[in-house]
Amino acid sequence: MKSKKLLFLLCLSLWMVNSINAQEETEKKSDSSINKNAIYGSVGTAGVYFSATAYYERMFLGKHENVKNSFFARAGYGGVASWGGNWSYLLVQGGILTNAKGKSHFEGALGLVFFSEEVYDSSVGPAISAGYRNQKPGKSFIFRAGAGYPEALYVGVGFGF
């Protein structure tokens, strides 16, 4: 039953991100901007547990040419395996990506994670991450590395479109 709720929340959050985008004016994409949509996955470990997460992300770029930072919203679905058991989670985050015109970025995100089973006497907790992202403007490939919760120390790859 909880898996159905998590799937519903994931679909709802993706719909909300796309609905917000539908309200914006469409603008011509240039080769000097980061792709606004991305799908990527990551794997992580904290030594006592392993995680794997798949994400959909929507970037909200500024409308000026001198923009240094961009903001994003993302939703992810993942799982954790540990000696104490396995569980899945859904997370939603908002964040910032620095140096939007370059290829090397710092990304930071904050949000909520919804666990399918009770974890630490709660099924909802904070979702936080900070890390490095390599994503060249106008190119599709994305590489990520960093630390966060529930991902732990993670590396990931994906593509923007």
Image (cartoon, rainbow, N blue to C red):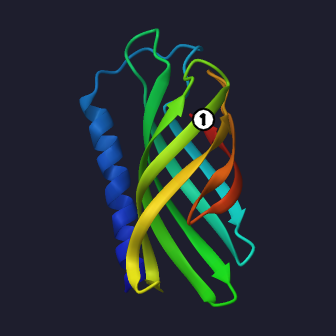
Q: Nearer the viewer, residue 40 or 117?
A: 117
Q: Nearer the viewer, residue 37 or 119?
A: 119
Q: Residue at x 62, y 76 (%)?
A: 80
Q: Residue furthest right?
A: 47
Label 1 residue SS: strand
Q: Residue at x 65, y 69 (%)?
A: 51
Above or below — where is 131 with respect to 3? Answer: above
Above or below — where is 99 with respect to 158? Answer: above
Q: Residue furthest top?
A: 65
Q: Nearer the viewer, residue 33 or 81?
A: 81
Q: Quadrant of residue 23?
A: top left
Q: Residue furthest left?
A: 23
Q: Residue at x 67, y 24 (%)?
A: 103
Q: Estimate the x, y position of residue 121 in percent, counting from the top left.
A: 41, 87
Q: Estimate the x, y position of residue 126 in percent, counting from the top left.
A: 43, 64
Q: Estimate the x, y position of residue 157 in percent, counting from the top left.
A: 70, 47
- Identify the amino acid type marked 1: Phe
Residue 22 is left or right of residue 120, and the answer is: left
**Residue under numbered circle 1:** 106
So how many labels did they put on this image? 1
Residue 76 is left or right of residue 20, and the answer is: right
Q: Quadrant of residue 6?
A: bottom left
Q: Estimate the x, y position of residue 61 in percent, counting from the top left.
A: 43, 25
Q: How dense is the environment of label 1, judged by Cα within 10 Å: few (below 14), some, or many (20 and up)?
A: some
Q: Residue at x 75, y 73 (%)?
A: 47
Residue 24 is left or right of residue 134, and the answer is: left
Q: Quadrant of the N terminus?
A: bottom left
Residue 81 is left or right of residue 25, and the answer is: right
Q: Quadrant of the C terminus?
A: top right
